[in-house]
Image (cartoon, coloured by chain):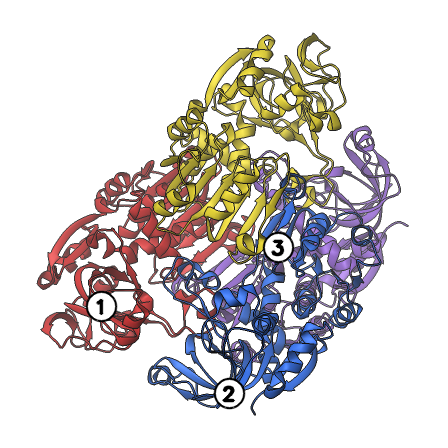
Chain colours: A red, B yellow, C blue, D purple
Amino acid sequence: MRALVKTAPGIGMDVRDVPVPSCGPTDALIRVQYAGVCGTDLHIWEWDSWASNRMHPPVVIGHEFAGTIAKLGPEAAAAGLLQVGDVVTAEGHIVCGHCLQCRTGNAHLCRRTQIIGVDRDGAFADYIAMPVSNVMKLDGIPAELGAIMDPMGNAVHTVLEGGEVPGSTVFVLGCGPIGCFAVGVARAAGASLVVASDLNPTRLAIARAMGAHATINPSTEDVTARINELTNGDGMDLVCEMSGHPAGHSQAFQVARQGGRVNMLGTPSRTTEVNFARDVIFKGLTLYGVTGRKMYTTWQQLGRFLRAGQLDPRPVITHRFPLERIGEAIGVIKDGTAGKVILEIGS
Amino acid sequence: MRALVKTAPGIGMDVRDVPVPSCGPTDALIRVQYAGVCGTDLHIWEWDSWASNRMHPPVVIGHEFAGTIAKLGPEAAAAGLLQVGDVVTAEGHIVCGHCLQCRTGNAHLCRRTQIIGVDRDGAFADYIAMPVSNVMKLDGIPAELGAIMDPMGNAVHTVLEGGEVPGSTVFVLGCGPIGCFAVGVARAAGASLVVASDLNPTRLAIARAMGAHATINPSTEDVTARINELTNGDGMDLVCEMSGHPAGHSQAFQVARQGGRVNMLGTPSRTTEVNFARDVIFKGLTLYGVTGRKMYTTWQQLGRFLRAGQLDPRPVITHRFPLERIGEAIGVIKDGTAGKVILEIGS
Amino acid sequence: MRALVKTAPGIGMDVRDVPVPSCGPTDALIRVQYAGVCGTDLHIWEWDSWASNRMHPPVVIGHEFAGTIAKLGPEAAAAGLLQVGDVVTAEGHIVCGHCLQCRTGNAHLCRRTQIIGVDRDGAFADYIAMPVSNVMKLDGIPAELGAIMDPMGNAVHTVLEGGEVPGSTVFVLGCGPIGCFAVGVARAAGASLVVASDLNPTRLAIARAMGAHATINPSTEDVTARINELTNGDGMDLVCEMSGHPAGHSQAFQVARQGGRVNMLGTPSRTTEVNFARDVIFKGLTLYGVTGRKMYTTWQQLGRFLRAGQLDPRPVITHRFPLERIGEAIGVIKDGTAGKVILEIGS
Amino acid sequence: MRALVKTAPGIGMDVRDVPVPSCGPTDALIRVQYAGVCGTDLHIWEWDSWASNRMHPPVVIGHEFAGTIAKLGPEAAAAGLLQVGDVVTAEGHIVCGHCLQCRTGNAHLCRRTQIIGVDRDGAFADYIAMPVSNVMKLDGIPAELGAIMDPMGNAVHTVLEGGEVPGSTVFVLGCGPIGCFAVGVARAAGASLVVASDLNPTRLAIARAMGAHATINPSTEDVTARINELTNGDGMDLVCEMSGHPAGHSQAFQVARQGGRVNMLGTPSRTTEVNFARDVIFKGLTLYGVTGRKMYTTWQQLGRFLRAGQLDPRPVITHRFPLERIGEAIGVIKDGTAGKVILEIGS
């Protein structure tokens, strides 16, 4: 079958012909139809320090996907809960099930996590084998949208952690694809005011298309002043930190209200100087680090938003490429012109 | 001033001329503009066993209202947080502030609660004096809607208790005014599916106008079958029991999903036979009794829904009367043709 | 191997020689050392209506046990997380992993649950095969105590649901083995006052040995009066309803404080007449139906209590029998003289 | 009356003769018996940048106290909930009751907070007038202990925020008085393992006296290695950051487990460099800034711990002085030889 492979250390990836993966007793073999390209894939392409420290080529890339079950292992088939032909997506974090985190509802923080497309073969291929425990039926969600439930799930996790979104004010700081999804999730979840900021006007336009009541460009506007104006000086109940920049952190702490919450998803590449006394302790703030998706509450919530039509992520999808044109996909992500980029792999 | 007074035991109420209430050091004297008529007021009019056991006439009736601050007591004025002329509403439960419930975030369950219009003089009058701790500025909410924030708050409390409305399925069982408000609140809070039931087609029409995805009339439809069809057999995440009938309780327990929640607001006048093993224990259900509004989280959430336009209660308001026509107001409530009924008192 | 088998409808069970169960790819075959006898096993022995409606003999009985891993299936062995020789216990609810409940942290309410010793072969035998996802290492907990972590887990689930035990007042209504465990759990979890009631003085003595600050015998004392005296009239924050009797329910609702919680574990065999207005709605009570153990948060919490020596269940264990003397074990449970009864099976 | 007054900018405080404060309509005038000396009082004595920026002398100092009600204002007396002669303590944060924080259960974060002994006259005096809403009866707690419920409440807030202490592992980083109280609170609340660290062996000895299972001196031991050893490599569920040092923050993030929580009370005087990717986001940590005491849930919990004898703070009290010897009190705090220091004021 075709597969996009990180064949060796260094820049780039290659389409190769590799064997169809074997399907273990509790696995589903899935014919991939669509896959999403993630910032992580860009890091792998570029072979940055994170990638070179963590990965062991050759590895098939890709962790966001949807497709059709082509085969079930004998145990999986006997369980009778999935069928060949089911249109499915899957959680890409394969966890141990036995550690403290797995045993206490925090499997997304399993210390033995294997991520597909990073630690083991991934989804930019004609087929992928996945443990059925990670596989979920789309039940009416179009496969193209099912393919990006992983990053949409990041947004759901970021917005809903804290549990008080209805009637609240939400600031999305950074409008990459997950930030734009977060805008839509906050609206779907009943936020009263959703404000988004980014330096890139194209991204702000997508955020508005996803339902932001207001957008702010920090290059031309005073973010704190605008937020104070929009909230009568209260500040925001929830800040979703999607930028991963020290300046974003500082801004996040400043605009969060007394007793507010900052859920942090954007991954910074360097350290941040924090004034804990002023910005966290005296404000009574809660900070929360977002990793992955809650397994599987996040997926359930997202599935319902999508099936009910409360969340429509299509304004965020800006590009579609066949598998072979991965170089172009990486290119549009790298130059900042893309929202979400999708690979069309099978049918 | 004019006031609607329960002058003595027995049926009815009378408009009387009474002194303007005195305004204590921490009170606001409020010029009443609008007031809402509640099922409780019907019980008082009818002088049922609850009313005759609890009340000590003469009492000025009415606990839902909005108006303008006419005067502030010296301590209240010195605090500088409210001003004469502010358009306000108020929580009608006056609590002690010292009991276990008041000291642990459950003031709505204070064992020394005094309810205006029941235990002390109320709001169906030209003026009412209220402790400023109970008074809230409307800040842009129209006074007519401010006057019914008390019952809308009951709906907010019923829908949001449990904290997992975004993406969930909500069944509103009983479409009196608070049930219809609950439909709107569930939609505002991001529920994926809101279903309402009632025997009265007029009320079901209001529920649909408030945003119910589906309505069910148990007199002609099999409620459980419809719910199973709408939820793929899962049942509902949250049931808001607004009917107060034993048959409603039984229906509520039946359609709630395994691990679901039944928040009970409707006040039954008799006992219910409950199969706790089948309906609660093996289902892992949570039941919760709703009293009043959380002080004051509920009011904050509701204020935001109204100011943001996420909740528009106007389809529920079916009648408006001047103070003197209270008999007609009680009449339309009694014969079931009314949604919410408002008294126009001042200007 | 030896196994205690419900061979056919009717009263009793028989020790039979049956084949050692096969060990699937993701299973552990466990050499059983100790097992606990549960009220459920009494129902099965007696073949009451619950048992006759649910079970399909022949079935090996028993769901509470601990033992040593004798063999691992190939997938389980490859995972490397368990080893032959590990001393383990297991959750006896085998769940589907795919339903709404399993996918949202409520696997204990899975609608496809198979219970060992009821729906499939159980643990009163020399060997049992269990999916490794259900198996947990005892890590220092004595195997005899590990064998009764299932019912101790019921107690942990009942006491900790609600999350506010430290400093609170807990009433354990019904002092069967799980009630007595609940007393110990409430003490371990930092309750300020733990009160237990039962009609049986022997059980009350065990409750005191487990740490109850006070015990009440309703046959000779006024429970509500005692509770009011012990709580300055506040009532109890949490009532653990372990009796399963309508009179217990009524008592539970009465002594729970305004805004309190009643967690119900005792399974009633008939219906209860409930005054929801007086007992639930106006009190702002929360009722919660306890099924099984949270998978696997409950097990983690319990494991820590046991390893730290915060909970010592040994005062509750009153009898030990070899497998062959099951009739005597059932007998002491039936005549009410027993606390917890343990079968000594292997070594 | 006597009062300890910050009379003017600069170092020190003076005992002065000042008028007894007036008692407003909703106030209680309290005869002070005992008062606690806090690190804040040291800042005020030293007139550091925080003090000089915030305070406007002359101000009577002191915010931790207990005493006897000498007089009630007319509204307070009419309410009948407190009586002259009641032995009481009080929350020293006087809040507005109207802001978003006050209206949503976060009055401890009120933006208009006035702190006694800082923003208005305090408790190091023969009498203090307090709004009765802030006053709580000791109901059997010795007045000397009632006088330090403020800092013990800080410890309760720090330990219990997160709500999962029973059976958990708690690391108290920094063993000043509040850290030592936190050790006792964690034990009272059912933690399975409580570990404390400090550079000062005297403080570690107090922590052990308060119930720490283990103590670590970072000057001679590898904290992370010890924690890993004590927790089988899991790390700690909850870290209470009481040191207020950047090195403490760094240590806190390192030893908190994946998915753990760091509640931060120690107030740093400078910024901290944080690696959010490694230490917060990939670990799924929650950080929470602790300000004051939850009004009044914290006080209720603490009162119950003290009345039930679950928490005995006496090992932390190392010094007692009369009001006039404030200089000595400040001295022992400054030189690090003190635990908690109490002023004996009245009788």
> Are callouts 2 and 3 both on one chain?
yes
Nearer to us in this view, C2 or A254: C2
Task: Quickly name the residue at label 1.
Answer: A44
> Are callouts 3 and 1 both on one chain?
no
Q: Are marks 3 and 1 in contact (CB under 8 Å)?
A: no
Describe residue D177's horizontal placement relative to residue C145 as left or right.
right
Describe residue C86's horizontal placement relative to residue A18 as left or right.
right
Q: Are marks 2 and 3 in contact (CB under 8 Å)?
A: no
Task: Quickly name the residue at label 2.
Answer: C16
Across and down, in percent, residue A57 comes to 21, 77
- Label 2 is placed on what type of residue? Arg
The C terminus of chain A lies in quadrant: bottom left
Q: Locate residue D176: give its quadrant.
A: bottom right
Mark number displayed over residue C270: 3
Disc 3 element = loop
- Label 3 is placed on what type of residue? Arg
Nearer to us in this view, B254 or D193: B254
Describe residue B224's horizontal placement relative to residue C170 as left or right.
left
Disc 1 element = helix
